[in-house]
Amino acid sequence: MDLADTGAFARVGIVGGGQLARMSAAPATALGIALRVLAPTPVDPAAQAIADTVIGRHDDLDDLVRFAMGCDVVTFDHEHVPPAHLEQLESMGIAVRPGPAALFHAQDKLHMRQALSDIGVPSPKWSRVPDLATLAQFADDAGWPVILKASRGGYDGRGVWRVESLAAAADILEQPLADGAEWLAEECIDFAQELSAQVARSPHGQAVAYPVVRTLQKDGICAEVVAPAPGLPASRAVAAQELALRIAKDLNVTGMLAVEMFDDGYDLYVNELAMRPHNSGHWTIEGAVTSQFENHLRAVLDLPLGSPAPLAPYAVMVNILGRDVGDLPSAYRHVLARDPGLKVHLYGKAVRPGRKVGHVTVLGHDVEELLARGRHAADYFAGVIDE
Amino acid sequence: MDLADTGAFARVGIVGGGQLARMSAAPATALGIALRVLAPTPVDPAAQAIADTVIGRHDDLDDLVRFAMGCDVVTFDHEHVPPAHLEQLESMGIAVRPGPAALFHAQDKLHMRQALSDIGVPSPKWSRVPDLATLAQFADDAGWPVILKASRGGYDGRGVWRVESLAAAADILEQPLADGAEWLAEECIDFAQELSAQVARSPHGQAVAYPVVRTLQKDGICAEVVAPAPGLPASRAVAAQELALRIAKDLNVTGMLAVEMFDDGYDLYVNELAMRPHNSGHWTIEGAVTSQFENHLRAVLDLPLGSPAPLAPYAVMVNILGRDVGDLPSAYRHVLARDPGLKVHLYGKAVRPGRKVGHVTVLGHDVEELLARGRHAADYFAGVIDE
């Protein structure tokens, strides 16, 4: 389809067919931006919702080129595209945002740790772990337990272990690693809460910072988010925003950046980076003037960014996880009838245990009431409760 | 695509490929509802944004049947489907909402006038006009000017004339009428403002009423909307909502109903009905907990309705109209940079003079400031101003 026939002024290509690409469709349509996705199958979440879907693999260069031709900029639903493929796209004159060099920080945790240490970002102690002896030395300094991570290939808690002893670590270090991955040890921070600071940054250097949110992880998966983080002192909230803005600038990130942090009640320690819309920002769809999905599109197109201001005192987002039980359609009528103020987002996925299949968001004044409403809806969808 | 592969629990078909179908995509995706549209061409606004598009005509029964097979319910982007075709779909067991009998009130203005009079809804004086003599008699009673309307086939001010004399009316009455149309005369109400009251109603009888809004028409086209109508006494706002709820019930409307009214400062007079999402409700996308597009989908599927509560003290919506001048893409950067709080909706249409090509919405406290921001953006997009 020729852009001139549609009034659209640019085409953005998103690699990956998951829920992040799916939720980008609404702001793309509103802004008159043509959206194309590269998805492995026609029933992937984004493929269902986006008319211009190219079926193909993110790790196949031919598929990537076929998809990218005609796009004004290529961006991502996930971090799994091989860096060499992205460099190849760039060498063909295709704009890739975030660029391969920036994105590599989100693809390789050792690279990220080294870069953050180089620019003086507060982080847990960390060490490359070529062998058990190095780990023993690291644990003498940082103490047990230690967080062991594969430097590449993990997500949603996969590829991350909390180990209490050298013996337990030895078992893990025997596991095979993904291509190019190494073992990384990190100090286990005794945190009071986990925070996420999101910023959008555009190629010409404009940046905006969203309110800092509190995240709750269960089994390594984001379970719920409160925006803004309740009771977080203003000084620490500003420090978290400044950290995220500095990382975005120093690592030359374009698009959305999520900086996940540990807050031990005194200091902040950077845990992970994501260079795309992030689970901790789903609340912005209803809860902010400009959603993370809209600002990601505006940023990668180098358009002026939208206001990240919140629309209500608090927003609560709770993920819907698949369970053995649970039947989304039959839960639907009950959940909607019980709470007319609830915003439901389903991702068009078949239900499997532990799989993120959607989320709910509620806005209001009273955090405890919002959490109760959000958790009830998510539990009811999951079949954990039936009243 | 089989619904079972996607997690979607129902498929809604929308007849028509315009911006109303296009703006339904976002809530359908969020709710996990599969959406299909029947659009005349692949570059229609909705066809660009909705993966499951059937190309065909709304007045071709074969196209309608091909489109409707596999849909759980069929609804509308416009009122132009021939009633006999809808009855045919119903006779084949396809759910049509609003049903043909209800929808006919929005298709034929004489039928609407008679029905509203029958149920005692306050309306301008009106009369069928088979000839000039009847019109003369009507004007003797209602006074000049008189509003002349073709009972069928008009929209956005087409098919409506304000005439000052019998001689002027005679010229108009000579014009050919659409098939089945007749001439209708209505009293010209000397209104202080125009209002729109929107309600959603579901087949099992649940209904919700949105805040009553003030609309401003220019050349018969909705130009701007303020929600809620500033300064409207609570008693008259409630009266308008009750009128709309009563009309929805008595005419057995399912889905969204917009009741456009004249307010002369004392009384309300019903002007027009629309049984679908309506231009006067575009502000609800950002300005209400549940948008008109989401509640239309929920209503036609007989799901529980969402809260129509506003999210800010005021919302202002201004339409972007095409002009001879004006170039949307080049205006984009300026408009977004000037006002980071602005929400832009473009419809994916080629620009033509007088054509609605998009709208902007702003939320806040100060109506005059919001109007200034909205008008500036719309004028800049249209090329009417350049700074």
Image (cartoon, coloured by chain):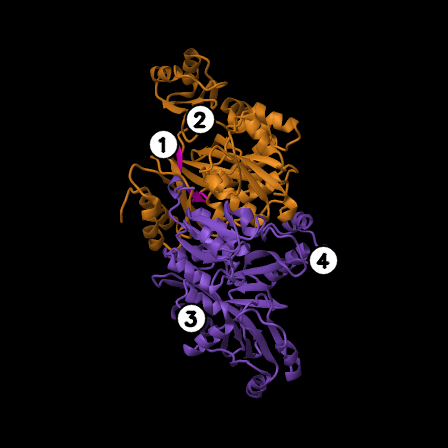
Chain colours: A orange, B purple
Q: Distance between the residues labelled 3 and 4?
A: 40 Å
Work out how far the residue at label 4 is from the one at label 1, CA to CA, in angstroms.
59 Å
| Image coordinates for residue A26, horizontal then vertical, percent | 52, 47
Q: Residue A219 carries which label?
A: 1
**Is residue A219 inside the magenta stretch?**
yes
> In the image, is residue A278 part of the stretch drawn in magenta?
no
Kind of residue indicated by mark 3:
Ile
Q: Position of residue A2 (x, y in %)?
A: 63, 43
> Disc 3 is attached to a residue of which chain?
B
Q: Specify the subunit that label 1 lies on.
A: A
Can residue A309 be seen here? The reply is: yes
Residue type (three-letter) at the residue carrying disc 1 = Asp
Q: What element carries label 2?
A: loop
Looking at the picture, do discs 4 and 1 lie on one chain?
Answer: no
The x, y position of residue A89, in whole percent, is: 62, 28
Q: Do labels 4 and 2 share a chain?
A: no
Judging by the rendered image, the residue that carries numbered circle 4 is: B324
Of callouts 1 and 2, which one flags the residue occurring earlier in the amino acid sequence? 2
Q: In which quarter of the image is residue A71?
A: top right
